[in-house]
Image: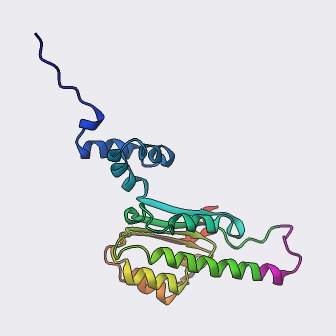
């Protein structure tokens, strides 16, 4: 009589092995989200990988802006504690060939309103992160990085290892760096990767 063979199943895999396997799906967000639904074990292992990097993306005039922020500002969002790399990508200020409004003042008012909403929502997200939670910050938008946002990062995120700041001005070539941004970058001893430039060079 032969002895039963020990079979290796997914459930019998060590936690670190399962983690290493799921890491192959790191850049396949939809597939990784599906693995969260397999079982409690898959959920607990997949969730930190799924939310390790979150970049909120929106279109011209802030299209999808509210939806993007609302999704992450949900009360007790389960993925929020796992975010290590956080960023913004999109365009809020855009003057098309055929403007939506014939009067420039109306367009300017819309941009001002969208900008104010953007800063309030972003500040709300940043204040929900734990101190020293973030490792990388990404800013790829035609919006200026305001002192309020910079001060929030400076006060609570002291373990940043990388910063990608591409705004409306070419900060590197023109030397236009706000005092708050300079202080923020100059005091981060862990900062190893720093990239400054204009958003238009990425188009």
Give the answer, above or below, for where 91 lies relative to 7: below
Q: Residue furthest bottom?
A: 179
Q: Which residue lies furthest to the right in this view?
A: 102
Q: Quadrant of the N terminus?
A: top left
Frontmost residue, 69 versus 53: 69
Left or right: residue 89 versus residue 180 is right
Residue 113 in which image quadrant? bottom right
Give the answer, above or below, for where 40 lies relative to 75: above
Frontmost residue, 56 versus 9: 9
Does residue 49 show up? Answer: yes
Residue 11 in which image quadrant? top left
Q: Quadrant of the C terminus?
A: bottom right
Frontmost residue, 138 versus 18: 18
Residue 24, horizontal then vertical, whole percent: 39, 43
Residue 99 lies within the magenta run: yes
Q: Give the range drawn in magenta.
A: 97-108
Residue 58 lies within the magenta run: no
Residue 190, horizontal then vertical, whole percent: 31, 73
Residue at (54%, 83%) from the top-left corner? 175
Residue at (48%, 46%) from the top-left corner? 28
Does residue 193 show up? Answer: no
Residue 67, horizontal then vertical, whole percent: 61, 64
Residue at (36%, 74%) from the top-left corner? 130
């Amino acid at each position: 009589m032969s002895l039963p063979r020990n079979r290796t199943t997914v459930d019998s895999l060590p936690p670190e092995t399962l983690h290493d396997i799921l890491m192959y799906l790191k850049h396949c967000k939809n597939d990784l989200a599906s693995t969260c639904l397999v079982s409690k074990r898959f959920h607990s292992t997949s969730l930190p990988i799924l939310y390790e990097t979150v970049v909120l993306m929106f279109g011209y005039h802030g299209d999808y802006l509210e939806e993007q922020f609302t999704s992450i500002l949900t009360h007790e969002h389960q993925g929020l504690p796992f975010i290590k790399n956080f960023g913004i990508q999109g365009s809020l200020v855009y003057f098309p060939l055929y403007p939506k409004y014939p009067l420039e003042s109306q367009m300017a008012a819309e941009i001002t309103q969208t900008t104010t909403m953007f800063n309030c929502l972003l500040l709300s997200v940043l204040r929900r992160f734990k101190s020293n939670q973030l490792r990388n910050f990404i800013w790829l938008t035609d919006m200026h990085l305001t002192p309020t946002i910079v001060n929030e990062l400076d006060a609570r995120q002291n373990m940043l290892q990388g910063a990608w700041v591409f705004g409306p001005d070419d900060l590197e070539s023109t030397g236009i760096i706000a005092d708050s941004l300079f202080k923020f970058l100059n005091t981060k001893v862990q900062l190893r990767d720093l990239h400054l430039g204009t958003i238009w060079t990425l188009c």
